[in-house]
Amino acid sequence: MGESLHTVTTMPTARQPGCPFDPPAELIDARRHGPISSYTFPGGKPGWLITGYDLVRSVLADSRFSSRRELMLHPTIDYGDMEAPPAPPGEFLLMDEPQHSRYRKPLVGKFTARRMRLLTERVEQITTEHLDAMEKAGPPADLVTAFAKPIPAIMICELLGVPYEDRGSFQEQVESFMNGETNDEDLMAAYTATQDYLAELVAAKRAHPTDDVLSDLTDTDLTDEELKGISLILLAAGFDTTANTLALGTFALLQHPEQLAALRADPALTDQAVEELLRYLSVAKTFMRTALEDVELGGRIIKAGSPVILSYNTANRDPERFTDPHVLDLRRQDGGHLAFGHGIHQCLGQQLARVEMRVAFPALLNRFPTLRLAVPAEQIALRPETADIYGVKSLPVTWDV
């Protein structure tokens, strides 16, 4: 292959001023040079950054690339000679086959599109309750705390069977170790507290099962430790991603009034709009894989043991896959984004996330026809790139009363 290899020396950690929805400029530039770049990890280990849609998708479907935590390097932090331990029991996102399927398989039937559609009425109820509270309190409001977080948080708590009186403190603990800004000591304290709580919850469900996914799983051969790990994965996947897509998606719609008007005018556009927002925002920005053997990829040889960064947000903005990829177009016809991943690790809760967004976006926009930002767009505080999930810290909005 005669084409020169582009090199990225550090993972970009800032978005361009005034472009809060676009990937960092250096990542877009890397994609312009080709779908694969070399990347030197902190500590000096050579690896790869994949920014092209087709190559990201092919790696996600290739069992020669591992998801095992103990094989991973962090893309921005040098941990020196410290080796990551294997994923704890149940945390199947960081495992390969056959362990991965042992944990995922009992869950698949709980998250089918049909079963998630049956939850639509409950999502509508929760959404209405929070819109009622927003309207009663009057403007302005922080859409993150008033609307975007509570809907997925309540739904995942109900699926896990978290008692109503525990949900507030439980949600705070989870938020603390997922926001990308908590210091190490507080992060570990919040993570440990969440683990301890989930252990108690599993024991309670085993002793007195109720009508929820976790109780159902106590009727399998999974141990308490495994159930705790599965609960943590469901919690992390089911809460933070949807909450940030709802908030950031509303911000994006408010910044694209012609798209917002189209969605308000045509309810039939909702499903398409949700898919386009998922593509355009790609809040789960990057994932890691490690080559288990030498693999030819995009004309390059990825050596066994090489760490690979998969850039979802540039893959979903790949001009070779999407027409005008940096344009938010709710009527877009070229779907097939990677916001939920691909292959055996494709997001288990994607149908629940879709139900929540298909209900929440139209309900919010129809309830508040004059909804707008309460501060200039450039003052909206964004989550740092170091957070696993991108989004806004808060979204002050107002409306006419």
Image (spheres, rainbow, N blue to C red):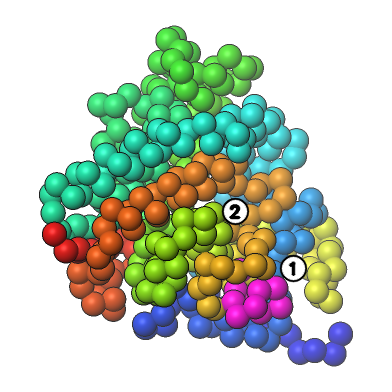
Residue 212 or residue 68, whichever sits in front? 212
Quadrant into which the N terminus falls:
bottom right
Please, which residue is most extreme toward the front here?
265
Residue 344 or residue 360, whichever sits in front? 360
223 vs 28: above or below:
above
Q: How many marks?
A: 2
> Does the magenta segment cover residue 62?
no
Residue 98 or residue 334, whichever sits in front? 334
350 vs 18: above or below:
above
Tell me the magenta residue range. 316-325
Residue visible at 35% across and 50% down in the picture: 363
User: Which numbered tag is attached to residue 54?
Assistant: 1
Q: Which amino acid type is shown beneath numbered disc 1?
A: Asp
Quadrant into which the C terminus falls:
bottom left
Residue visible at 60% across and 47% down in the picture: 347
First in sequence: mark 1 vs mark 2? 1
Quick one: SS at disc 2? loop
Where residue 192 sits in the image (x, y, percent)? 37, 37
Q: Quadrant of residue 61?
A: bottom right
